[in-house]
Image (tube, rainbow, N blue to C red):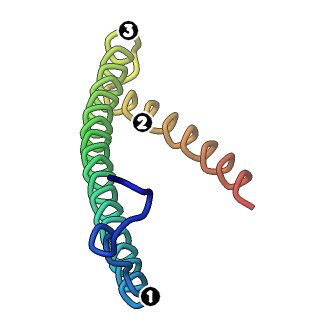
């Protein structure tokens, strides 16, 4: 018959203070190690994404630069075809326009930098 009392053998043994502190320290150690591992994996993932984006950006700039040069060559030959200016003069006109545009952009950029 159960009288509400428990026998000493029915109760689990109470852990001592040293065992509790040791368990807590082990748990904290595991959490810190898992946190460091997770942070490392997140950083590696972000670096991989940044590397992919940089490669795509570089390829885009390269293709854009080639396209721009071809358009400039086309502009030179259009000027040569529809004007009496010789081909070397058309290259000079387009090149001079680019130099002026570049100088204006440099001056504007210099103004924005404190």
Q: Say which residue label 3 marks.
A: 82
Dividing the picture into quarters, in which one does residue 83 lie? top left
Numbered label attached to residue 92:
2
Q: Secondary structure at mark 2?
A: helix
Task: Give the labeled residue for mark 1.
Answer: 17
Choose the circle earlier in sequence order: 2 or 1.
Answer: 1
Check disc 3 and report its element: helix, strand or loop. helix
Mark 3 crowd level (few <14, some 14–19, many ≥20, 10 Å Cα) = few
Residue in the picture at 38% in, 78% down:
14
Tell whether label 3 touches label 1 (CB within 8 Å).
Answer: no
The CA span between labels 1 and 3 is 96 Å
User: Residue 44: image x %, image y %?
Assistant: 27, 58
C-alpha distance separating marks 2 and 1: 88 Å
SS at mark 1 in the image: helix
Residue 32 in picture, x, y percent from top left: 38, 72
Label at residue 74 = none
The residue lying at 33 percent from left, 55 percent from top is 42
Task: Report the side of 100 relative to 70 (left or right).
Answer: right
Could you say where residue 11 lies in the image, as x and y percent from the top left? 33, 69
**Residue located 35% across and 62% down the image:** 39
């Amino acid at each position: 018959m159960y009288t509400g009392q428990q026998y000493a053998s029915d109760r689990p043994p109470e852990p001592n203070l040293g065992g509790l502190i040791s368990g807590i320290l082990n748990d904290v150690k595991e959490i810190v190690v898992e946190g460091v591992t997770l942070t490392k994996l997140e950083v590696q993932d972000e670096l991989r994404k940044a590397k992919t984006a940089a490669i795509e950006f570089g390829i885009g700039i390269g293709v854009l630069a080639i396209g721009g040069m071809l358009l400039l060559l086309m502009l030179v030959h259009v000027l040569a075809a529809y004007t009496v200016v010789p081909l070397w003069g058309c290259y000079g006109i387009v090149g001079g326009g680019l130099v002026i545009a570049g100088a204006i952009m440099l001056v504007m950029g210099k103004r924005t930098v404190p």
